[in-house]
Image (cartoon, rainbow, N blue to C red):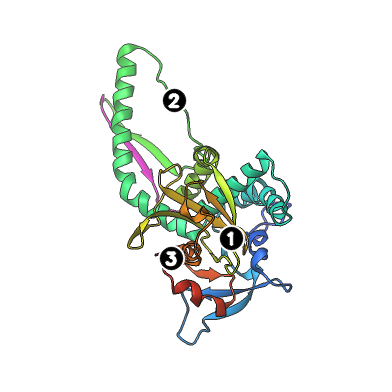
């Protein structure tokens, strides 16, 4: 009988449906029945209702988004790692924010790490990552191979062992290196091959959340409560990296540790977690229009769904734009 690798592969239940927007996050936009209002950016036909009252469980997930194949079997270790190291610790801290309790330095770290994970784990970041690798990886591999050959030759000539530097987690990097050397020949071909796909995406995700995340931990962060009359939006890509100059000059390509980038995520309907203390979003005298800019910044970043807001309230934010 043919084995179905998509079913349970260990004693624990296998996580097939990977929620890239955690249910513990979505529940803060839900009602007492565990449902939220969702606006689908992509629909099958024009008759699909603009807004749908949907179950939290059925939103913000994709089958096998983080599944890896190890030793010819499927593993959900990435999903479990994201849940145990990022979602669960932050969920407890978010509840402390709701209760207006004092946060410790460890609590702040949990919130920052949760935001980082939420920034890099979505389908939007998957597409962004693959596009970047398609553009940059051929030259990077070519340059690395040439540099490696020079180091190998120098090591042999000098009779010194090769400095291997800091090895990467090869288990996550889908790379194959082969050599071709004809019998009797002193020179051959060194070849490196990879596939730009989910494997590279997961390698990049793991690297960012174990190494590069330190750049975010070094930032200053603020919890901003919405003023009266404002409630925050969120989406299936809730972290915004905004480079804002004026109402006609802005983009969402900001980076971690980049000067001038406003990084924020709406944790609750009235709570915004924002990087930096200089932003005009934190001005005590900010206007209704300035606060709406934070909501409108969320809309273009969504890839599939603008989530979790009563449909009759959305127009007030759309009318302002980013100005």
Rendered location of residue 245, percent (x, y): 35, 55
Provide the residue designation for mark 2. 165
Q: Which mark is residue 81?
A: none
Mark 3 and mark 1: Cα distance apart in space:
17 Å
In the depicted structure, whether residue 307 falls above or below residue 81 = below
Circle 1 sits in a helix, a strand or a loop, which is it? loop
Which mark is in front, 2 or 3? 3
Whether residue 290 is visible, yes or no, is yes
Provide the residue designation for mark 1. 21
The residue located at (48%, 34%) in the rendering is 168
The residue located at (35%, 39%) in the rendering is 192
Rendered location of residue 124, percent (x, y): 46, 59
Q: Quadrant location of residue 99?
A: bottom right
Q: Which is more toward the observer, 115 or 250?
A: 250
- Lower position in the chain sequence, tag 3 or tag 1: 1
Provide the residue designation for mark 3. 300
Mark 2 and mark 3: Cα distance apart in space:
41 Å
Is residue 191 inside the magenta stretch? Answer: yes
Is residue 103 inside the magenta stretch? Answer: no
Circle 3 sits in a helix, a strand or a loop, which is it? helix
Mark 1 and mark 2: Cα distance apart in space:
36 Å
Give the magenta-colored segment's residue range: 186-198
Circle 2 sits in a helix, a strand or a loop, which is it? loop
Left or right: residue 265 versus residue 33 is: left
Q: Which is more toward the observer, 273 or 305?
A: 273
Q: Which is more toward the observer, 73 or 81?
A: 81
Q: Quadrant location of residue 301?
A: bottom left
Which mark is in front, 1 or 2? 1
């Amino acid at each position: 009988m043919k084995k179905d690798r998509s079913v349970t592969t260990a004693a624990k239940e296998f996580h097939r449906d990977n929620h890239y927007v955690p249910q513990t996050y979505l529940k803060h936009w839900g009602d007492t029945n565990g449902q939220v209002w969702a606006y689908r950016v992509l629909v099958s036909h024009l008759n699909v209702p603009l807004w749908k009252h949907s179950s939290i469980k059925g939103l913000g997930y994709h089958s096998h988004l983080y599944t890896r194949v190890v030793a010819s079997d499927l593993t959900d270790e990435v999903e479990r790692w994201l849940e145990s190291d990022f979602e669960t610790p932050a969920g407890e801290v978010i509840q402390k924010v709701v209760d207006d309790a004092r946060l410790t330095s460890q609590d702040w770290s949990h919130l920052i790490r949760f935001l980082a994970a939420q920034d890099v784990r979505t389908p939007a970041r998957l597409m962004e990552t693959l596009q970047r690798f398609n553009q940059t990886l051929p030259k990077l591999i070519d340059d690395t191979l040439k540099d490696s050959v020079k180091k190998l030759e120098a090591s042999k000539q000098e009779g010194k062992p090769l400095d291997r530097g800091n090895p990467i987690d090869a288990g996550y990097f889908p790379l194959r290196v082969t050599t071709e050397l004809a019998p009797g020949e002193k020179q051959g071909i060194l070849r490196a091959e990879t596939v730009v796909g989910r494997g590279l995406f997961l390698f990049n995700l793991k690297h960012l959340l174990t190494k590069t995340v330190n750049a975010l931990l070094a930032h200053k962060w603020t919890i901003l409560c919405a003023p009266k009359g404002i409630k925050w939006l969120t989406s299936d890509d809730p972290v915004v990296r905004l480079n804002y100059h004026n109402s006609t000059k802005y983009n969402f390509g900001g980076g971690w540790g980049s000067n001038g980038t406003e990084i924020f995520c709406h944790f609750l309907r009235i709570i915004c977690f924002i990087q930096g203390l200089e932003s005009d979003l934190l001005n005590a005298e900010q206007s209704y229009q300035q606060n709406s800019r934070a909501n409108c910044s969320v809309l273009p970043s969504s890839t599939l769904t603008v989530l979790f807001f009563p449909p009759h309230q959305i127009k007030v934010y759309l009318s302002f734009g980013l100005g």
